[in-house]
Image (cartoon, rainbow, N blue to C red):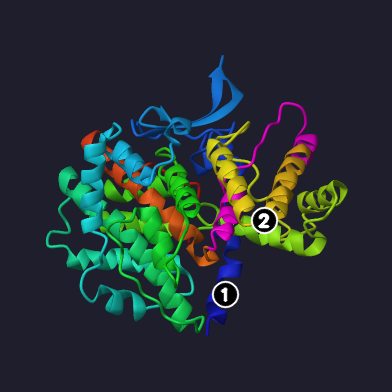
Amino acid sequence: MFDFIEDKFKKSLSDNSIDTKLYDVYNVKRGLRNADGTGVLVALTKISDVHGYRIVDGKKIDDDGHLYYRGIDIYDLMIKDTFGYEKVCYLILFGHLPSDKDLFKFHEILSEEYNLPNEFLENHILKNPSKNLMNLIQRAVLALYSFDDDPDNTDPMEVLKKGIALLAKMPAIICYSLQAKKHYIDNESLTIHHPNKDYSIAENILYLSRNNGEFTKLEAETLDLSLIIHADHGGGNNSTFVNVVIGSTATDIYSAISGSLGSLKGPRHGGANSQVEDMMETIINDISFDATDEEITKIINKILDKKYFDNSGLIYGIGHAIYSLSDPRAILLKEKCRELSKMKNQEKAFSFYERLEQIAINELKKRKGEGFNCCANVDFYSGLTYKLLNIPRDLFTPIFATARVVGWLAHNIEHKLSCNKIIRPATKYVGEINKK
């Protein structure tokens, strides 16, 4: 049926592609990136900052990685706390850490919004299962628009209230989407728990996603940490930028969040940890955890030569657009993963990841030459961490999405309060004129 379309498309490829040299001719920043890989400045923000290099005399100098939420280094937020993620949400939204009293009240407000509207589960999730949960989650978020008495109200205060209510509902949305897939597509038993108002967001994800609803304190702490380190990453990351762009049109928050979810679904963004796990499982199946360093080195070089795994030449989980010497999120998650691997008797798996990480970095440095630096990014250990938590692969990206809702919301509101202009960059036309 589409043979005609395919034929026409193949013949039109030259008309639809642009000579990459023209980007230099017209000084167009491909992917909104400067020639040295830094991002083109498109906005100002007070919410979070990502630090991985310094500019000295116009030259980019690699530096230790840091992530700041409202000026506070993420390393300083790693206090074991049942409601650590909620504390970070409060910080990101209001600009300062909450008192114990304010944190209690904030959790109380969130917990009152945990449950989905009446019949929402049946009509919008169970009746519409999806092979990819992100697709169903997008639809569920859009469907919430119809349950809002004043959905198109984009006053910053109203957007904040709607966004907090949506954040609170995310554990139920992602976990019920998982249960729908397991039952209707994977032919497993359907298990539905009601959200527990006494639990944190991290605890509810573990509770709602497990048939027996049970979890340990270390498991809850680990997932809470994962939510904290994924809560925001500056205004320039793809899904946050998408949210601000959509929000700048003065459309509703449900549309903006849905757009961000679509962005995060992509394997170059939120789905990266699944690619890491696919790569690592392939390697482990071929050479086992007991492989020598020489065997690991050989397989790393096969990847770099585009002769192994997906033949892309990429070692997934190694390298980052901003971080070069270290990714603070990876460092924090790695240590929690180490602790979890001991509890789960999976030290051999963790050790293999750690060895491969170092060998991959060394081999990349050899190929790139003096002055090149790279490090493991957060995706390298997040997939293994989720596996140790017995979290299904289907939930990897949805958990990232749940964590990032607060960042999307904060940047959406910040744009409304400060810039409040529709985002409309320019493009340069390089096609023919008066073509016949």
Q: In the image shown, does 416 or 326 lie closer to the viewer?
A: 326
User: What segment is highlighted magenta in the picture?
Assistant: 363-390
Q: In the image shown, does 324 or 96 lie closer to the viewer?
A: 96
Q: Does residue 70 appear in the picture of this structure? A: yes
Q: In the image shown, does 244 or 385 lie closer to the viewer?
A: 385
Instruction: Name which residue type carries label 1.
Output: Glu
Q: Which mark is residue 6?
A: 1
Is 100 part of what is drawn in magenta?
no
- Identified at 60% across, 53% down, the residue is 343
Is 369 part of what is drawn in magenta?
yes
In x, y percent, where is residue 161? 19, 50
- Quadrant hosting residue 286: bottom right
What is the C-alpha distance between the residues marked 2 and 1?
Answer: 49 Å
Label 1 Cα crowd, 10 Å radius (few <14 / some 14-19 / many 20+): few
Which residue is disc 2 drawn over? 346
Label 2 Cα crowd, 10 Å radius (few <14 / some 14-19 / many 20+): some
- Identified at 77% across, 42% down, the residue is 359
Up the image or down, 429 lies above or below 264; here it is: above
At mark 1, the secondary structure is: helix
